[in-house]
Amino acid sequence: MNNPVLHDLVASIGDLAALPTTVVQLLDLFKDATCSATDVVQVMERDPAMTANVLKLSNSAFYGARREISSVRDALVMLGNRSVVTLAFATGMAPIMRRDLVGYGISRDRFWGHSLQAATVSAIVAERLGVGEQRCEAFTAGLLHDVGMLVVDAHLVANGLSIGFDQQWLDVCDIERQMLGFDHAEAGALLASHWGFPDVLIAPVERHHEQPSSGPHQEVVRAVTVGNLLARMVDDNLDVTGNDFARSTLAGLAF
């Protein structure tokens, strides 16, 4: 991440360079494994729209609540502090992440839909890998894994460039590097660092297109790599049976 062009780009991308106050506060809670229910409520009560979205997600089939969750405190009791912070953080990031990627030819609904699907699968994969205690980290990193595309897209549009995303491409990073000298994984990691994200989120953003290997936060990285790959397979009906990267990424996992 020593590319000076990329550093200048991340420093000058306007509204992407700063997170909303509520999201920053939630990020602080996310970093604090001992945050209290009162801390969570105090942050969320300042944002009624976020609270409504969190309650909607809390009552979804994915969480399988035994009864209707009608308040933030109910959600905290039923799902746990960390899960609620994760959901709130996801809803807070929606206005930032839900954008058209004009330089890639990707609609905002497609981009946000893929991000959510990858997040959900990443959390499930973390359970399968035996690190269920990090499912919230996997979900959040899965949600953010392609955030660097926002940076790259701003650069493409400003310079009248286009990558012309092909749904059958498994990895667009090679095209990005050939055209620009950097890719969206590098850009995303730099932006995440600029935002003050913890390493457990930065590592999957930076490495989600790499072959599975050892390294810091390797299980969360692998969960997000698999989550992204499976989401792409579903989104685009990809046949990856002959792809070495896909085979090594999915090795040993059964779904």
Image: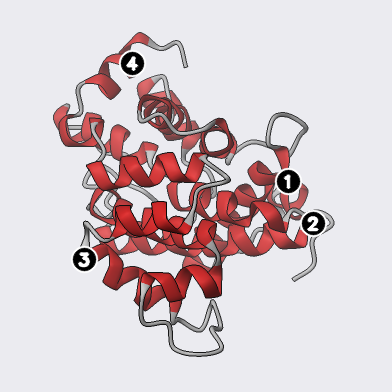
Query: Mark 2 or 1 closer to N-term?
Result: 2
User: Is the residue marked by circle 2 packed among few (<14), some (14-19), or many (20+) residues within 10 Å?
Assistant: few
Q: Which residue is mark 4?
A: 7
Tag in front: 4 or 1: 4
- CB under 8 Å between discs 2 and 4: no
- At mark 1, the secondary structure is helix
- At mark 3, the secondary structure is helix
Q: Which mark is residue 200?
A: none
Q: Nearer the viewer, residue 166 or 207?
A: 207
User: Is the residue marked by circle 3 packed among few (<14), some (14-19), or many (20+) residues within 10 Å?
Assistant: few
Q: CA distance from mark 3 to mark 2?
A: 36 Å
Check the image and name the residue furthest to the front.
Answer: 38
- CB under 8 Å between discs 3 and 4: no
Q: Nearer the viewer, residue 48 or 96?
A: 48
Tag in front: 3 or 4: 3
Amino acid under disc 3:
Pro
Amino acid under disc 1:
Asp
Q: CA distance from mark 2 to mark 1?
A: 24 Å
Relative to 143, is 147 above or below? above
Amino acid under disc 4:
His
Horizontal side of residue 27 vs 127, given as left or right: left
Check the image and name the residue furthest to the right.
Answer: 252
Tag in front: 2 or 4: 2
The image position of residue 83, as x and y in percent, is 52, 61
Query: Mark 3 or 1 closer to N-term?
Result: 3
Tag in front: 3 or 2: 3
- The residue lying at 24 percent from left, 30 percent from top is 17
Query: Mark 4 or 1 closer to N-term?
Result: 4
Q: Which mark is residue 130?
A: 2
User: Is the residue marked by circle 1 packed among few (<14), some (14-19), or many (20+) residues within 10 Å?
Assistant: few
Q: Which residue is mark 3?
A: 48
Q: CA distance from mark 2 to mark 4?
A: 36 Å
